[in-house]
Image (spheres, helix red, strand yellow):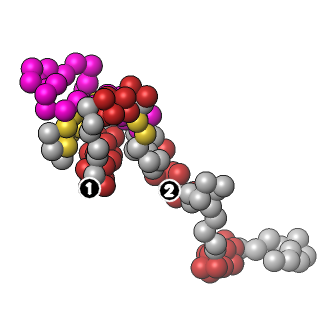
């Protein structure tokens, strides 16, 4: 827009120029493939909900291996869904129960800290958690 004879464009002219041109805006993504809108939503949720795949600590992996526990794809999906629900509720350390398996998950790091099967949960006492999800 040109400024002629020391006259500035009106608000209506600027509004028309920029708002009508906004239909051609492009959605830009960061290097990790997230758009600005997606990053903003994550920040608004306080980064409690992670989009990364669920990880298993060395301790949890050893527990599963020692007890010959193999998670099916369905169980892993439900564990991930339970972890996401816990994060949405603001839980930091969650007990997530899937079938007869119990997992303690650090929500912020999206990491399974430990895993137990039915034989270890006989006392039904879980410490150092601030929420539980049963899926």
Q: Residue at x 40, y 43 (%)?
A: 54
Residue sitting at x 19%, y 22%: 126
> In the rendering, at what x and y percent does residue 67 appear?
26, 32
Mostly what secondary structure, the magenta segment? loop
Q: Looking at this view, is 122 or 104 the one in front?
A: 122
Q: Could you tell me residue 86's position as x and y percent?
A: 28, 40
**Element type at mark 1:** helix
Q: Nearer the viewer, residue 68 or 52?
A: 68
Disc assigned to residue 38: 2
Residue 123 lies in the magenta stretch = yes
Percent position (x, y) of residue 31? Answer: 66, 55
Left or right: where does residue 33 sit relative to residue 59?
right
Pointer 2 with pointer 1, Cβ within 8 A: no
Q: CA distance from mark 2 to mark 1?
A: 27 Å
- The location of residue 92, given as percent across then percent down, is 34, 30
Label 2 CA crowd tier, 10 Å (few <14, some 14–19, many 20+): few
Of marks 2 and 1, the one in the foreground: 1
Determine which residue is flagged by label 1.
Answer: 74
Q: Is residue 88 visible?
A: no
- Check disc 2 and report its element: helix, strand or loop: helix
Would residue 50 be found to the left or right of residue 6 on screen?
left
| Tally of marks | 2
**Residue at x-position 19% and y-position 43%:** 98
> Which quadrant of the view contains residue 105?
top left
Q: In the rendered structure, which segment of residues is drawn in magenta?
A: 105-131
């Amino acid at each position: 827009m040109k400024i002629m004879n020391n006259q500035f464009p009106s608000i209506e002219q600027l509004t028309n120029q920029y708002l009508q041109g906004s239909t051609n805006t492009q959605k830009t993504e960061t290097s990790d493939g997230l758009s600005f809108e997606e990053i903003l939503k994550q920040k608004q949720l306080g980064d409690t909900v992670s989009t990364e795949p669920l990880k298993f600590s060395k301790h949890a992996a050893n527990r599963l291996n020692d007890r010959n526990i193999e998670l099916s794809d369905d169980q892993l999906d439900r564990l991930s869904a339970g972890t996401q629900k816990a994060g949405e509720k603001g839980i930091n350390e969650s007990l997530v129960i899937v079938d007869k398996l119990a997992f303690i998950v650090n929500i912020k790091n999206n990491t399974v800290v430990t895993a137990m099967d039915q034989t270890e949960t006989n006392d039904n006492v879980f410490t150092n958690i601030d929420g539980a999800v049963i899926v």
